[in-house]
Amino acid sequence: MQNILNYINGKHVEAHSGQWIDNYKPATGEVYSSIPDSDEQDVNDAIVAATAAFPTWSKMPVGKRSEILLRIASLIDENIDSLAMAESIDNGKPLWVAKSVDIPRASSNIHFYATAALHLHTETHAMEQSALNYTLRQPIGVAGCISPWNLPLYLFTWKIAPALAAGCAVVAKPSEITPMTAFLFSELCIKAGLPPGVLNIVHGYGHKVGSAICGDPRVPVISFTGGTKTGATIATQVAPMFKKLSLEMGGKNPNIIFADCNFDKALKTTVRSSFSNQGQICLCGSRIFVERSIYAQFRDAFVEETKKLKTGDPLQDDNFLGAMVSKPHLEKVLGYIKRAEQEGGKILCGGTQIYPEGNLKNGYYLKPTIIEGLTNDCSTNQEEIFGPVVTIMPFDTEEEVIGYANQSVYGLAGTIWTENLTRAHRVAASVQSGILWVNCWLLRDLRTPFGGMKQSGMGREGGFEAIHFFTEEKNICIKL
Ligand code: NAD
């Protein structure tokens, strides 16, 4: 059984506690590796290393920093097969998803920020003959980056790449549920020649490691992706220290399907946006609103297409869904399905576990589930489920569906399906959401702002926005 290790000051080390946490393989339900049960002593080591590395890293010519990051990106590309396999085993996601989405996107995150750093610029403001103002943009210091389990390496790099490119040193904490690719990534960083201490990865529980990073005054900037409840805990903890904080949190995304949509495209993409990665993408649609005149036709076709999706062994390419990430999460999602029924929901398909033959029989498999007959205000439609479970509801007017979409504490993402361009613009402007896709889903341009409104987020990642976040602006005014 493999022991995953912390990566501190350029070296792989065990936790001070000497304790380990079991790491499960979701496809089989077996423990297959262990991670260090780190605490504030390990976080302290990481912060000391990062603080020592920061002056040299931040003052290194940006072209040189960029070169090192590009070497890391190339090493990800060279190791795509083994990283994708590791991600699939650790998370339960289909191997084809890890290979086509997670790992290539991890590499492109690093590539994007390694090159974006070369183009960072600031403004000058001349005051006619009297003075010249210019802005210095300086890396803040040691950044804390905390990431979730659903897209492990992809979201880990989405934070550390802009932080490192900006010139910050980093103390990072991957999810304890999916630690493997962050560990493999640390091996690639050593190979690429990343100087010791520039990136430190401390494994372990959120309430120990995550909380120690957030609570330490030597870490002035925190970037977090995860659940809204955890985000609230972190916001409360760091507020008295006035840390810079970026929060990417949960969602309850609406899919709005008008009668004038391209039916086949809307159908095909809605299947994907509902059940990709077992519904465990923060951008997955979970409340599907269909205009009444096509409701029955769309619902029947949606159920039929969903029933065709195969769920099972993540390593088999014909399975669209693999295993849920963990037993507790599977049980939580099953609990939501039960509650939906208690609230009057009718299960149109799915709703139950799958027990494949052989060594996969104890894996965490759940059939893709569609629920009908619920009102938008019930708890099933208000709370994030984060699994392969969606509800479907009819609507009559544009105004009504905008009201439904916005009747949520969340505001992360949504899709709008219509061939009426004017309506598309009008509805997109009215839905309270950080990201809206019109006639598509999950198209990604790294230059665009990414994040949520309301309880889905605070701040934006992506583009220069993310590099700027890890810097402090300073205006310098020169009297002429
Ligand atoms: P989580 O909040 O349980 O954990 C996220 C990370 O925070 C983990 O590394 C965890 O160990 C750490 N953590 C836990 N408690 C902490 C604490 N007190 N202090 C500091 N760190 C702590 O979330 P999860 O279950 O890993 O991920 C699923 C959630 O993430 C869903 O709600 C999903 O919507 C959200 N998510 C959001 C986005 C986005 O971009 N908005 C992307 C992916 C996932």
Image (spheres, helix red, strand yellow):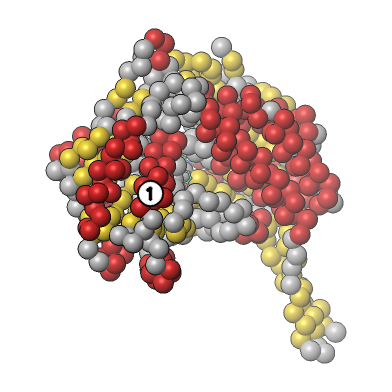
Left or right? Give the position of 473 relative to 439.
Answer: right
At label 1, counting other C-alpha atoms closer than 10 Å, the crowd grade (few under 14, some 14-19, many 20 or more) is few
Residue 38 place in picture, x, y as percent: 56, 28
- In the picture as drawn, the residue positioned furthest to the bottom comes out as 129
* Amino acid type shown at disc 1: Asp
> Which residue corresponds to the image point at 33% horizontal and 28% vertical from the top-left?
366
- The answer to whether residue 424 is above or below residue 211 is below
Q: What residue lies at 79% left-to-right and 46% top-to-bottom?
A: 65
Is residue 313 at all visible to an observer of this figure?
A: yes
User: Residue 304: which quarter of the image?
Assistant: top left
Question: Within 8 Å of ligand 1, the CB of disc 1?
Answer: no
| Closer to the camera in the image, 26 or 354 | 354
Residue 432 showing in the rendered view: no
Is residue 102 rendered to the left or right of residue 121? left
Q: In this view, does 309 lie above or below 223?
A: above
Q: Which residue, given by chain and number where applicable, does mark 1 sit on?
A: 264
Q: Which residue is drawn at 76% across and 75% down?
A: 124
Which residue shows up at 85% across the image and 84% down it? 480
Query: Residue 322 or 190: which is nearer the viewer?
Result: 322
Q: Which of 424 and 94 is in front in this view?
A: 424
* Residue 183 % position (x, y): 63, 28
Task: Classify the position of the N terminus by image quarter.
Answer: top right
**Total marks in image:** 1
Q: Position of residue 22 (x, y in %)?
A: 48, 19
Task: Locate residue 285 relative to residue 188 in the image: left or right.
Answer: left
SS category of the residue bearing label 1: helix
Residue 354 percent across, percent down from the top left: 31, 22
